Image (cartoon, rainbow, N blue to C red):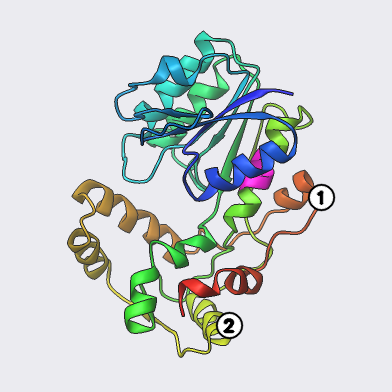
């Protein structure tokens, strides 16, 4: 068994990944931004690199992501990839986002290329929009106004459950079957946000609807919520890609890697029902 570093271990994917890796018998070191007395946790500031040496002490493999809020993902992830390369880790699994490889100069793509050229065994996973956004980032509108406010029109999205992303990452860290490959991760159904609202309504018993808003209104709402301007601009930009239809495509990667079909949106909604009622 291996000693595996999980960056972002307290996040939506990281929390589930830690569970999966432990179930497979691995020792996990959880890297988070907060100091914690737990023996299996280290404090790592990905923005500055503070805590990097302690985080990588004795590590065999690693899972990297860039936490929300940063637009310089190439610098954040590049620092982690360089640290892994300097220590000749057995393998790195990097999570970016579906579509990250569309433009070679994009920060996430630059990080992917850095890993591909590192000489390390690797996998890159690019998940589509998370189902869990509806119980986190988009939660306030649903709870306060029974409304999903997004500038995405009637475009469809093959949403993926973060638990499936974690299951994929755990399998890739546990096995070398898929080494040096990249995977776009999606769910098995593509839904409009009207269809999402209908599912949430059915599960919660509340009349939840979707309201298409302008990109300007979305940006204003993000700024009022305290999101930095540059990250608000980034979110509005990628929501624009969703509206243009780039998030509709489905892949079979989750089933190919884990051996099971992806979690459907209705199952996710039932599991997280308490968030909206």
Quarter assignment of residue 232: bottom left
**Relative to 200, is 130 above or below?**
above
State left or right for residue 226 relative to residue 149.
left
Taking depth in this image into account, of 43 and 200 the one nearest to the observer is 43
Q: Is residue 62 magenta?
A: no
Q: Residue at x 58, y 82 (%)?
A: 203
Residue 192 relative to residue 28: left or right: left
Where residue 172 appears, as percent x and y from the top left, is 70, 35
* Vertical relation: 106 (above or below) 92: below
Q: Which residue is mark 1?
A: 259
> Can you name the residue that lies furthest to the right here?
259
Residue 203: image tag: 2
Q: Residue at x 74, y 24 (%)?
A: 1
> Does residue 151 appear in this view?
no
Q: What element does badge 2 sit on?
A: helix
What residue range appears in magenta? 166-170
The percent position of residue 35, horizontal first and vertical second, equals 36, 32
Q: Position of residue 222 (x, y in %)?
A: 24, 61
In the displayed structure, 89 sits above or below 109; it is: above
Task: Say which mark, if any, is on residue 137.
Answer: none
Alpha carbons under labels 2 and 1: distance apart: 28 Å
* Vertical order, 2 against 65 (above or below): above
Quadrant for residue 216, please give it.
bottom left
Marks 2 and 1, the one that precedes in the sequence: 2
Q: Residue at x 44, y 17 (%)?
A: 54
Res 139 seen here? yes
Is disc 2 in contact with disc 1, using a CB cutoff of under 8 Å? Answer: no
Q: Main secondary structure of the magenta part?
A: helix
């Amino acid at each position: 068994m291996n000693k595996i570093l999980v960056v972002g271990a307290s996040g939506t994917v990281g929390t589930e990944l830690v569970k999966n890796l432990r179930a497979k018998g691995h020792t996990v070191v959880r890297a988070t931004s907060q100091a914690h007395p737990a023996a299996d946790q280290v404090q790592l500031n990905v923005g500055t690199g503070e805590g990097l040496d302690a985080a990588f002490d004795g590590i065999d493999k690693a899972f990297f992501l860039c936490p929300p809020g940063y637009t310089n993902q190439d610098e954040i992830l590049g620092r982690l990839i360089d640290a892994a390369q300097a220590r000749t880790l057995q393998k790195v699994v990097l999570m970016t986002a579906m579509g990250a490889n569309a433009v070679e100069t994009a920060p996430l793509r630059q990080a992917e290329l850095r890993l591909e050229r590192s000489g390390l065994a690797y996998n890159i996973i690019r998940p589509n929009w998370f189902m869990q956004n509806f119980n986190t980032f988009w939660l306030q509108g649903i709870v306060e106004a029974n409304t999903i406010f997004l500038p995405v029109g009637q475009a469809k999205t093959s949403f993926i459950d973060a638990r499936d992303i974690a299951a994929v990452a755990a399998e890739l860290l546990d096995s070398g079957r898929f080494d040096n490959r990249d995977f776009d991760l999606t769910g098995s159904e593509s839904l409009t946000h009207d269809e999402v609202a209908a599912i949430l309504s059915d599960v919660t018993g509340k009349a939840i609807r979707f309201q298409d808003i302008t990109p300007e209104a979305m940006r204003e709402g993000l700024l009022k919520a305290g999101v930095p301007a540059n990250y608000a601009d980034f979110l509005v930009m990628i929501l624009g890609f969703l509206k243009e239809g780039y998030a509709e495509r489905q892949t079979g990667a989750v089933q190919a890697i884990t051996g099971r079909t992806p979690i459907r949106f209705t199952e996710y909604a039932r599991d997280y029902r308490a968030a909206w009622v």
